Image (spheres, rainbow, N blue to C red):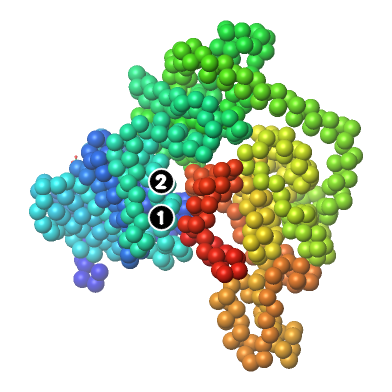
Amino acid sequence: MADTKYTANDIELLSELEGVRKRPGMYIGSTNLNGLHHLVWEVIDNSVDEAVNGYGKKITVTLMRDGSLTVEDEGRGVPVDIHKESGIPAVQLIYTTLHSGGKFNSKNYKTSAGLHGVGATVVNALSEFVEVTVYRDNQISQISFANGGHLQTPLHVIGSTNKHGTTVRFKPDPSIFPNTKFSYETIASRLEEKSYLLTGVHFIIKDQITGNTHDYYTEHGLREYVQTLTIDKTPMADVIDMSDSSNPIQVDIAMRWCVGDYSENIYSYANDVRTADGGTHETGFKGALTKIINDWASENELIRGNQSIDGSDIREGLTAVISVKVPENKLEYEGQTKGKLGTPEATAVVSNALANFMPYYLTEHKDFAVALIKKCAQAKEAREAARKAREAARGTKKKVAEMIISDKLASAQSKDYKNNELFIVEGDSAGGTAKKGRDRSHQAILPLRGKPLNTHNVSNQEIIDNLEFSTLIQTIGAGFGDEFNPDASHYGKIIIMTDADTDGAHIQILLLTFFYNYMKPLIDRGMVYIAQPPLYRVYKKSDTKKHIFCWSDEELEKAKQKIGAGYGINRYKGLGEMNEDELALTTMNKATRMLCRVMIDDSLVTEKRIETLMGKDSAPRWAWIQENVTFNEKDEFIKEVKN
Ligand code: 0RA
């Protein structure tokens, strides 16, 4: 940089890059692994945009040996001509100015998914280096940037070619991202998802270090997506799919019902970006589906005229993917994130697409339709039976339920719910220690006996019948499932406190599965935590009051050196080995403890992982464990997971 002369123009560009570096969260949400991968999505989305517009049939992502990442496409190539007003090559402007997209032909360069043309600059600002290689007009040109977007090597020609496309290589800046290691699994999963939404394009991932590689490619798009999503389930029939491109908003839908599945699995997309919180397109889908099934059922005299089946009973066991393509000028989102589509027209467009197709499909597949309506009616009966059971429990059995709570729960004194904390503790003995060590003004203790039920794919009735979970539901006091209301939670923090061993980890995952399936808003709001008890205590033999708690083997080594000769070590195998003061100091006291907040990095990976780890089919679980977990000779797992 030393010999670079800055013009007024350059200074403005640099301050834009500086702005991104000062507030990365504004552009990529966070600087954790989510934010890190956001950079990858931005780069991939630019290549996907080319492919969506018909330029290129292959996008290759490579995790490089040096920790950088390369995205290679066969698009038109980023323009390299000199921008008239500024005298700067277009590619340089695209990577250094926030609204460069608009400065060019915005029809050609609109990112449907990316940050509206700012993605390239954001990635550059947050990278240690970026190198862009462009293949177009028979030339290969290259430009590179370093340390947050400073021009390193000006655009120059490095060879000739008859190909066209762009290769972007970048390495995230470790001074911005605490962890700069890309996850193969996270990226692979995103590429797989893209391959279903964009048929006929190869999405290839390669890892130079492990040699892992995969080519994601589909010809039948959403149909294959639903097939994959239901691969471990028992489908009632083949996938039903439909498309409607007669409106400015294009719709594609694929869906299938599975038996023995009590969950509703709807994945919706707007312009190939997942809308995790649904929105107008999902509303249209759900409304139309409910009406169509009810109409068809009453026309065929399967239900009586005045009866109707609820939407949630119809969607039980349904896996559906809804994808809409909304023109840029109609694209609206609700809320801050892009999680919820707001475009009002999408509701009618999706609803009509379904209404124009589904009734005929049902009539043509009458056996299936009759079976489906029977399944819906069963869901309705089960739901009503569960409601009756709940009401009965609220009425006559109320006293019993209260006794269960008061017997086990040590509640907090304060009624300031937001500030209250519920510790769910493994075992009665640790529960007893925790009760003594807690700050009773705002900390409550709920001891668990043994392993909780695996709540993945069980019915609501089974949850209600389960003593441990019905106690937990009543303790939190905010309902569960569709009726869960996080605002009513009696606790601002729910803290899972288990031993630091495999049983403890198992209990954690069983509880997290429950929270994920039945109280997800708690996780979304960052209200679920895992307590972090220490693994060791190193003390001075001559003065046992001098001690250091350690949470890792590295800390243990440092502590040994710090205490010096004559040290002793306690290895905590469980919470029960600490006395109440130690447990309070290391794990519970707000001022001195460390908590791990449970967050969902990637909802699709999370859903798939829960299905793998907690689903009824053990084969995928076995494969995953083989792939990701290392055991020592005592059959204890020694390394948690690679991804
Ligand atoms: C601006 C204009 C055009 C293409 C691109 C940018 C472009 C950007 C990226 C980023 C990664 N791969 C990319 N491929 C293309 C259109 C250029 C034209 O009309 O030829």
Asked whether mark 1 lies closer than 8 Å to ligand 1, one says no
Secondary element under disc 1, as helix, strand or loop, is helix
Q: Which residue is mark 1?
A: 184
Residue at 61% in and 32% down: 260
Work out whether 241 lies above or below 267: above
Horizontal and vertical percent position of residue 111: 32, 40
Residue at 14% in and 54% down: 140
Q: Quadrant of ligand 1?
A: top left
Residue at 38% in and 63% down: 173
Q: Amino acid at mark 1?
A: Tyr
Residue density around tag 2, few if under 14, some if 14–19, many if 20 or more, within 10 Å: some
Horizontal and vertical percent position of residue 249: 38, 25
Work out whether 241 lies above or below 97: above
Which of the pair 115/298 is nearer the observer?
A: 298
Residue at 38% in and 23% down: 243
- Say whether residue 310 is visible: no
Q: Which residue is mark 2?
A: 190
Q: CA distance from mark 1 to mark 2?
A: 10 Å
Asked whether mark 2 lies closer than 8 Å to ligand 1, one says no
> What's the mark number on residue 286?
none
Horizontal and vertical percent position of residue 267: 49, 35
With 631 as the anchor, is 454 left or right in this view? right
With 321 as the anchor, is 443 left or right in this view? right
Which of the pair 628/137 is nearer the observer?
A: 628
Residue density around tag 1, few if under 14, some if 14–19, many if 20 or more, within 10 Å: many
Q: Amino acid at mark 2?
A: Arg
**Dot 1 or dot 2, earlier in sequence:** 1
Horizontal and vertical percent position of residue 445: 79, 56
